[in-house]
Image: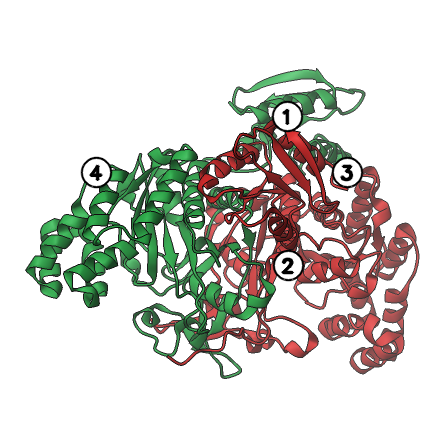
Chain colours: A red, B green
Amino acid sequence: MELIMPRVLKGFRDFLPEQEIVRRGLSEKLEAGFRSFGFLPIDTPALEYAEVLLGKAGGETEKQVYRFTDNGGRDVALRFDLTVPFARFVAEHRAELVFPFKRYHIAKVWRGENTQKGRYREFTQCDFDIVGADSAAADFEILLMMRNALVACGAGDATICVNHRGLFNRFLGRLGVEEKLVDILRAVDKLSKIGSDGVRELLCACAGEDAAGAALDFVNFKGDWEETLEMMTQAAGGDNPDSERLRLIRSYLVDAGCHDAFKLDPSIMRGLDYYTGIVCESFLNALPSIGSVCSGGRYDRLLSLYSKEALPGVGASVGLDRLIAALESLGAGAGKRTYAACAIACVEEAAYGRYQAIAEKIRRAGIDCEVFGEAKKLSAQFVMAEKRGIRRVIVPPSGDATSFILREIPSRTNREGLSLEGVIGIVKASEAHPF
Amino acid sequence: MELIMPRVLKGFRDFLPEQEIVRRGLSEKLEAGFRSFGFLPIDTPALEYAEVLLGKAGGETEKQVYRFTDNGGRDVALRFDLTVPFARFVAEHRAELVFPFKRYHIAKVWRGENTQKGRYREFTQCDFDIVGADSAAADFEILLMMRNALVACGAGDATICVNHRGLFNRFLGRLGVEEKLVDILRAVDKLSKIGSDGVRELLCACAGEDAAGAALDFVNFKGDWEETLEMMTQAAGGDNPDSERLRLIRSYLVDAGCHDAFKLDPSIMRGLDYYTGIVCESFLNALPSIGSVCSGGRYDRLLSLYSKEALPGVGASVGLDRLIAALESLGAGAGKRTYAACAIACVEEAAYGRYQAIAEKIRRAGIDCEVFGEAKKLSAQFVMAEKRGIRRVIVPPSGDATSFILREIPSRTNREGLSLEGVIGIVKASEAHPF
């Protein structure tokens, strides 16, 4: 038989255990955080009707989508994000959900993107949203969760930059260029990439010189939350509900004692015209250059493809792959090669059943424990443990012996004459306070 | 704009929170079990080269596969199981892995199956395998994990039926019908569906009347492990390494104290000709009619599509959807509608930041806590808690008050005059011993 070359598609990748342990650890921390706020998990199919995912128009997104005709002749596509399936889900199951509905969804999505930018065609999204509530409380809860998620992941302090698209729209209305919104958003979104002069050029082209200057002053404004809000409020023509919303969010942040992590930043736009209220991006203080690792905002037209009823929502999405890259750069997160805190050495193969019975007692104490299956020399089994990233090897009694030996792999030292309870106590204590 | 009907593809489905909480709970228990044995997680792409997944021949499987040409002109397919991608993974990364390599993989797979049988086209597989070890220890470890997985899932006692394909092959060799193996396997595999007479007819057609009679006697033999092994050994022509393997596995099971859950059953075949050593299926004692909820066996030719080198392996797969159906039938598992053990009522909306600060203290004590965002009447907030499946509502102090009220939703009773620490103590204690 002719052999086939084992290889993955361009833009796709395998995760080896060491990488997958990091990814699962991160995903579990995020999920624990979402659950602790009362958010509920959902899941949706990877494959949907193309029309359901793309609408009837298609557009820019379509080029990147994995779309094909299935064996039943249906026009289908792999989901390219978790937002559109969520909208379809809410529209379809509206009567079964309790609102405000708070959901999280951690799942793969697929986009046939240009891989030259170092992007992958399969990646994991972690979305969390509240739908059915248009309030400062809901906006604030999402902001708080963003910050908690980043802290929990061990990425150190983060700065979450907040803006309000409603206020920006009011400002553009006063300038008389609101119909240029999409072009202006795209231009301002490039600020960090092409600088003020570059953006000015783009803005002049679409909105004229005066509006360009005013818009640049707006987005480049530097000040604390109160000063920035005052500027934005004036630019928007005075007091209005959007300014009031930002004022209330700020007071919640202060009351919760975490306002230092949040900045009102008029340059944050989030390219999509999808957002209608707050928009936010978050940057790791230790590695701002990697870009936003968690972004989101408020939207009003979630259901617009499927229903005439409006449903307000607010949410954010963690870029898991970018976050992992950041943690790697910071030297955090990686290095764990197994969950097993210890292994039982195999002294005689005939006793393997008894070794597994011992391991069961250790596992019941909450300790993950591997059992080696081959009665090689102990020194070879210690090397095996080292290769597998296991820090302790338990040598069970054999012959007339009744006591255990505990080998500490990093220090190459033995503790002898231990009872099984003694072994469990030592491993448990060291797992509780690892280094 | 014309609206689009929100609907999923035939054979696909959404998971609402109540269902997804069950699925995730089960998957987390399985994963904790796999990790406790030192098994490592991996992940592979959902989409691969069709040739890599299907080989050059294609065959029966191919009809069920989601296969298409991507935008780059590649012939690609969605994975239809986790075994073939695992083989490709091991062949590709062989030099990076430590053998014996023990991995688990819990992920979605896709098959365009006939949905009339109540089957889904997207479902989750949970596979665990040891490759690089051909030993009774490895066989036994997989068997032990199968049983532990089912116990951990709360499905009650299970019976794991074991057979050995090597012994059956030796027996067929003595009958002189080994070249009919595949047909004979398929016939015997139908025993529980079409009964002895039906199978006899199929066997006569492919192997002749004498062999059919002998094969039926073999697979219908009833006895304890020792008696059955003796019969199989004689049928295979006397002592041989496969019988010795089963003898050793049995002694491990006895030593580990779990032999009562295991049965040597000569009728277990696992249709595929892929298996070469032990094969096993497991049945819930409380619900045997649902069929095997975890099955597997030993194989030698894992890498055969990609490499001339042999690599022995043994593993099993949990049918998560079938297991969930079983748990539902048994009235176990379902009913949890949220992770939140409590919610903080919203007495005044201006204090929402303070409420989240209180919730943070509760979360740090390890309790998942939602915060309600709207200052509705308390009675309405208690109804909201009930709808969301939250058993306790904490009413924070307002005005001059300093103490908390804890509302128990099921009993509609209040405990008043509590400190925050008091509230945390009560919730924590009741979560540790629910009901």
- Which comes before the other along the chain, label 1 or label 3? 3
Inter-mark Cα distance, 1 to 3: 23 Å
Q: Residue at x 52, y 23 (%)?
A: B410
Q: List the residue tagged with mark 4.
A: B223
Chain under numbered label 1: B
User: The residue tagged with tag 3: helix, strand or loop?
Assistant: helix
Q: Residue at coordinates 17% horizontally, 46% vertically from top-left?
A: B220
The residue carrying mark 3 is B353
Q: Nearer the viewer, mark 4 or mark 1?
A: 4
Labels 1, 2: front one: 2
Which residue is most to the left? B209
Which residue in the structure is indicated by mark 1? B428
Residue B380 picture quarter: top right
Chain at tag 3? B
Instruction: Identify the element where label 2 is drawn.
Output: helix
Marks 4 & 3 on one chain: yes
User: Residue A240 appears at what percent x and percent y?
Assistant: 80, 52
Give A10 or B233, whichever is nearer the viewer: B233
Crowd around label 1: few <14 · some 14–19 · many ≥20 (10 Å): some
Q: CA distance from mark 3 to mark 2?
A: 37 Å
Judging depth in this view, the residue of A214 and B263 nearest the camera is B263
Image quadrant assignment for residue B75: bottom left
Measure how far apart labels 4 and 3 are at the Cα level: 69 Å
- The numbered mark at residue B70 is none
